[in-house]
Image (cartoon, rainbow, N blue to C red):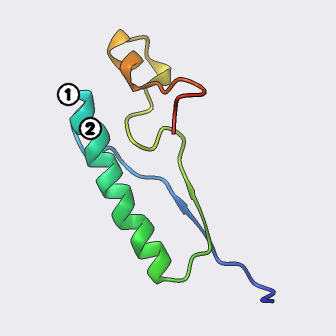
Amino acid sequence: MANIVKGGLIQATLSESTEQPIEKIKQSMIDKHVKMIEDAAQKGVQILCLQELFYGPYFCAEQKTKWYSMVEKIPDGP
């Protein structure tokens, strides 16, 4: 068993304008993260952490109802 575990963290910028439809933002961010996850795997990363709300903007600081549709219900979420 190895004594060293290689870890990684992803903190990414939004890849679409917040004016775009939510599904477009979400898919664009998922695509962006999949590439970064693949890159990390190629570099031997064993444990990889993504930022909270990785597939969209950090909307928690706003009170715009537009973002309500991004929430995932428990227990029906991924």
**Picture quarter with the N terminus:** bottom right
Residue depicted at 37% across the width and 20% down the height = 69
Please state if 32 lies on the left or on the right of 3 as rendered: left
> Regarding mark 2 in the picture, which secondary structure is present there?
helix
Please report contact status of discs 1 and 2: CB closer than 8 Å, yes or no.
yes
Give the answer, above or below, for where 41 lies relative to 49.
below
Rendering coords of residue 21 (x, y %): 20, 28
- Which image quadrant is residue 48 in? bottom right
Q: Amino acid at mark 1?
A: Pro
> Regarding mark 1 in the picture, which secondary structure is present there?
loop
Rendering coords of residue 27 (x, y %): 27, 44
Viewer-closest of 4 and 11: 4
Badge 2: few (under 14), some or many (20 or more) residues near its Cα, within 10 Å? Answer: some
Give the answer, above or below, for where 30 lies relative to 69.
below
Residue depicted at 44% across the width and 66% down the height = 37
Residue depicted at 45% across the width and 32% down the height = 58
Residue sticking out furthest to the left: 20
Badge 1: few (under 14), some or many (20 or more) residues near its Cα, within 10 Å? Answer: few
Viewer-closest of 62 and 32: 32
Residue placed under numbered mark 2 in the picture: 25
Residue depicted at 40% across the width and 71% down the height = 38
Q: Amino acid at mark 2?
A: Ile
- Which image quadrant is residue 70 in? top left
Please state if 77 lies on the left or on the right of 59 as rendered: right
